Structure formats: structure tokens, C-alpha cells
Amino acid sequence: MQQIPTITPEKRAKQARRHNSSCPELWDLLDEVKDPEIPVLSLWDIGILKDIEKSESGVCVTITPTYSGCPAMDEIKEDIVAQLNQHGYEQVQVKTVLSPSWTTDDMTDEGQDALRAYGIAPPKDAPQGCIKKQTPMANVKCPHCGSTNTVRISEFGSTSCKSLFKCNDCHEPFDFFKNI
Amino acid sequence: MTAVQQQDIIDYALRLGDDSLVLGHRVSEWTSNGPFLEEDIALSNVALDFIGRARMFYTYAADLMGEGKTEDDLAYLRDERQYQNFLINELPRGDFAFTIVRQLFVDVFNSHFLPLLCQSKDETLAAIAAKSEKETRYHLRRSRDWTIRLGDGTEESKQRMLNALDELWGYTPEMFEPDALEQRLAEAGIGVDTASIKDAWLRDVSAILNQATLPVPDAEWAIRGGRTGYHTEHLSHLLSVMQSVHRAYPGCQW
């Protein structure tokens, strides 16, 4: 049976904010700003970018952190300002909001596919039926060979957002983008 | 918000920030010293989560204080007596068993404390709690797994866990003794009445220790003082290391 994809109300509201925005060109500009640790993901794809407002006094960009201690957040703020400055927007303010807190559900489908192509298993490749918001012990789909004969080595990976798996078929280790 | 209540919230955010920063710093001392690579990475990640929490609490306190204060002023320019963290968080990291038992106690505490703080009438405190709660869930999975593995492990690992329980148990009562400030905030629907989570904490910790074939300590000693600014000898050493760069080069940026 085909499952009908569902999205959270927060994600829907965010999509509407972008869709109805009075400054669509700014959203497009910020699509060029990537996560410094995962350069295939734009801020929009990863779900960090919440809102952009343009007024006479300048541009205000609202973002939300992925993990409390994510060291990339400061760099991301600088990259946003630099990108907009480069395109002639001089007054740029970056505001951080904490609520509603970021979840993997905020990632775009395209972003998840890009992650897989980059060699990181996206949250949607967790085995069906595993407890939501928990890192599975095994059977995440290997981004290298597609096998689900895989096992978790550690819940903690090279960054807060990833955990470490290995594939029993192609024998490659790989990162899984944690479900939270 | 009345002026009196605002000062209470500042003090509350500060002590929650202190709990997170001091423990985060202690756990970060394992970075590059972990027993093996995956565990080194795990401990570094946990440390980052706690330091991230501290930043959020301090930033909020600094915003409420105004006068251009920043999170850095609060982390680097306060002295030992101004810190109000629980004593258990400042104890030296000890061996791996000591670190795991402390994390177990703190993670179980947070697994009950944070969901209640999520319901705070103060939106910022609730938002920080909602963010931290998710991380605590996997911190706890890990400290529980390690407790069971080490407790029900070799003779040596079990002995080390027993030693750690013995050394740490008396530092736990402090976590469940709200002072006047915390009681005021709990009554106002802003803070958490930590006395109310003591039974749940004991139930969870006991269940995990049972599974680990470790006894639940019945020690009757208790040490307290962190919330009033009275600390063990260890905090000032920790602060002198943590604050040395900022104090030598005020306002420095990486």
C-alpha cells in the first residue's frame, strides 16, 4: 500500500511563508548558503531557515538551531550576512528563535535525497516501523549499496546530528542523519 | 512581568546555565582522552549539548539583565561564589565509571525536569527545555546502556561502578531541595518544583541499577550548598582553567 506523505503543521506554515513571501528573491539567494559541515544541504533544505522579512530598515532573517551545541550556527550566521551583503543588502540582522524546536521533519525531501547521494543516510532511510525520534539499532539503508543489512556502531557520530553505522554487505561505514 | 519576578527569572536562568556549563566543561575534559574513538566522540558530543544549553540560558539571562551584558560576561567574568550549580556537576571527572554514574544521575534528573520546564509560562525557558529534552533522551539511553554494561561486566568494571556510586550518592539529594526562589517560580508556573520529581528519579535510577546488578546505595550522608554559592574545592580550579584566556585577554574573540 502506498503511504500518503504527510507533513507537520509547522513545516506547512514555513512552506507557506516562503511561498507567499514578498521577497522571493532573498529566499533564492539564501539557497546558495550551505551548511558548512554538509555542503550539499542549503539552510532551507536542512530546515534552519524559518523566515525572511524585508523592510526599509533592512533585511531580517530568522533561523533556528539544529542542536543546542551545534558549532556551525555561528558560521551560518556569518555566511547569511556575507551572502546578502554581497548582493547589495547592507543592513542584515539574523535572529535566532528556539520555538518550535527544530526536528528532522523540518528537512526537505530534496535535502534528504541530496544527503543520500552525498553518502549520508537520511532520516527517511530508517527502517519502517522503528520508533520515531530514536536512532535505530540496525537496518538503516546503506547509502553506498542500498542494503538494509546494516548495524549501528555508535549513536554519536562526527557531528551532533549524525550517528555511525556500518554495512554488513559492502562493509563500508556510513553516517546516518539522526532522527530527532 | 513584575520587576521582582524578572530578577527571579534571571537568577533561575543563571543557575540552570551554571549547571549546564560546569558539567559540559567537565565532560569536555574527556575530549581526546576517551577510552576509545567512538566514546571520545560521544563524550565530546554530550559536552557540546550541555555547553549549548548553557549558552541559551546565559543569553536569555543577559537579555533580561540588559546593560549590554552578554553570555560571555556571565560565563567568564563571574567568580566561584556567584556560581549556583549543583555540586555533583563540578566534581572532577574521575575514571570512566565515575563519569558514567554522574551522567546517569543527571540524565535521569533531566528526563523528568525538562518535560516539566517545557510547560513553563515563560516562553523562552519552555523553548530551551523543549530543545534540550530531545537531546537528553539519547544522553540517557547511552548512560543507561553503559551503566548496565559496566555494572554487569567484569569484576573490575563492577568494582569501579560501586566506588562511583559510593562517592556520588550523597550529592544527589541537593537536586531535589528547591530553595525559596525555586518555590516562588514553581508556584508562579515558571519554574519546576524539583521535590516533586524525586520519587520518579529514584524509581528510574533503581530500575537501571537493578538491571546492572548494582545495589541502590542507602548512604545517609548528603552534601549541599551549590545553590547558595558554597562549593567544593574543585569549582575554583575549574573556573581558573575555563576563564583564564578570557581574563587574560578581556573580550577576545576566536
Image (cartoon, grey):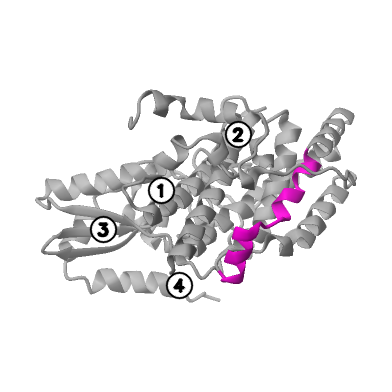
- Element on which disc 3 rests: strand
What main secondary structure does the magenta stretch of the protein show? helix
* Circle 1: element type: helix
Q: Is residue B143 magenta?
A: no
Magenta stretch?
Answer: B168-189
Q: Is residue B190 above or below residue B21?
A: below
For mark 2, give the secondary structure: helix
For the residues bearing labels 2 and 1, Cβ distance under 8 angstroms: no
Earlier sequence position, callout 3 versus callout 1 = 3
User: Quick check: A162 left or right of B218?
Assistant: left
Q: Nearer the viewer, mark 3 or mark 2?
A: 2
C-alpha separation, residue under disc 4 versus residue under disc 1: 25 Å
* Residue B189, image x, y percentages: 57, 71
- Disc 4 versus disc 2: distance between alpha carbons? 38 Å
Q: Which dot, 2 or 1, sits closer to the camera?
A: 2
Q: Amino acid at mark 2?
A: Arg
The kind of residue tagged 3 is: Val
The residue to which callout 3 is attached is: A61
Give me the chain letter of mark 2. B
At a point 19% along the width and 55% down the height, the residue shown is A29
**Which residue occupies the foreground of this view, B146 or B187?**
B187
User: Which mark is on residue B26?
Assistant: 2
Amino acid at the residue labelled 1: Ala
Side of A52 relative to B144 (left or right) = left
